[in-house]
Image: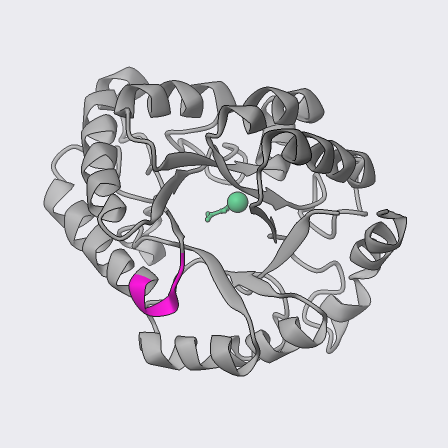
Amino acid sequence: MPQFAANLSMLYPELDFLDRFEAAAKDGFKAVEYLFPYAYESHELAARLQAHDLQQVLFNAPPGDWDQGERGLACLPGREAEFRTGIAKALAYAAALNCPRVHVMAGLLPAGMEREALRPTYVGNLRWAAAEAAKQGVDVLIEPINTRDIPRFFLNRQDHAHELIAEIGAPNVKVQFDLYHCQIVEGDVAMKIRQYLPTGRVGHFQIAGVPERHEPDVGEMNYPYLFKVIDEVAQQCGWTGWVGCEYRPSRGAQPGGTSAGLGWMKANAKASP
Ligand SMILES: O=C(O)C(=O)[C@H](O)CO
Ligand SMILES: [Mg+2]
């Protein structure tokens, strides 16, 4: 069975954010990820990780003005200075949290602009971020996201992400392969795992049921099968990354709802050799 990380932005919604670390550890998670650490001092977060014997495996670089609807700056001409300041801040947190990867969200297509016109800005920004991150051994992740959840998001498809990575040309830029988004946008998920995991360009997986983004055992996807595919290909190519549980518990913020919904993880652990 793959190793699962708890996404603390989505799981345990009934708890204060800092209390979610303990809850995840009690449920057997050894690692966590979340969107943004910036509302907290890095030492506070590091203390929670240490207290509960957890690894931080992923978080996002600052996305611009999230409350105003921004979803990353990487593709936006004219925002390069802010992009660089955000990457520097993310890398400082990565160092303090001993986190080996940072997700850099692409951003939304500005009104009237075509995707191709933004490509030079995106590639230039990612090259700069990759060079900075490489100085401290951090991978920069890029994630294709479906346009039902984020309309006009710049990056939607696995093939586009891998094409951009080839153009960026930095060994530490990898894909955050979210199977939920992949199923919504393009499907054929198992074959895409088989195609892309052996390239060495997949840095992290994320999972959720489709279409409601609940537990992996709710909805149209056959996750026990996909976990076996990940295990099989990972073993063949020596991949040792994490699978982030980035879903909204179907029991909502009901106390204990996240833990009660983890039957899928226990069932897959039992099924593994
Ligand atoms: O939404 C997702 O799937 C993510 O992983 C992002 O980090 C945030 O939008
Ligand atoms: Mg995701």
Q: Is residue 111 above or below residue 80?
A: above
Most foreground residue, 122 or 200: 200
Residue 40: x, y in percent? 35, 76
Q: Is residue 223 above or below residue 32?
A: above
Q: Is residue 110 above or below residue 244?
A: above
Residue 86: x, y in percent? 22, 54
Q: Which residues are magenta?
A: 95-99
Residue 99 visible: yes
Assign the magenta stretch its main secondary structure. Answer: helix
Q: How many marks?
A: 0
Q: Is 273 left, or right, of 189 in this rendering?
A: right
Q: Residue at x 25, y 35 (%)?
A: 126
Q: Is residue 253 above or below residue 181?
A: below
Residue 178: x, y in percent? 57, 39
Q: Residue at x 38, y 64 (%)?
A: 98
Residue 97 in magenta? yes
Q: How is the image coloured?
A: one colour
Q: Is 118 left, or right, of 10 in this rendering?
A: left
Q: Is 152 left, or right, of 52 in this rendering?
A: left
Residue 40 visible: no
Most foreground residue, 13 or 226: 226
Residue 216: x, y in percent? 75, 47
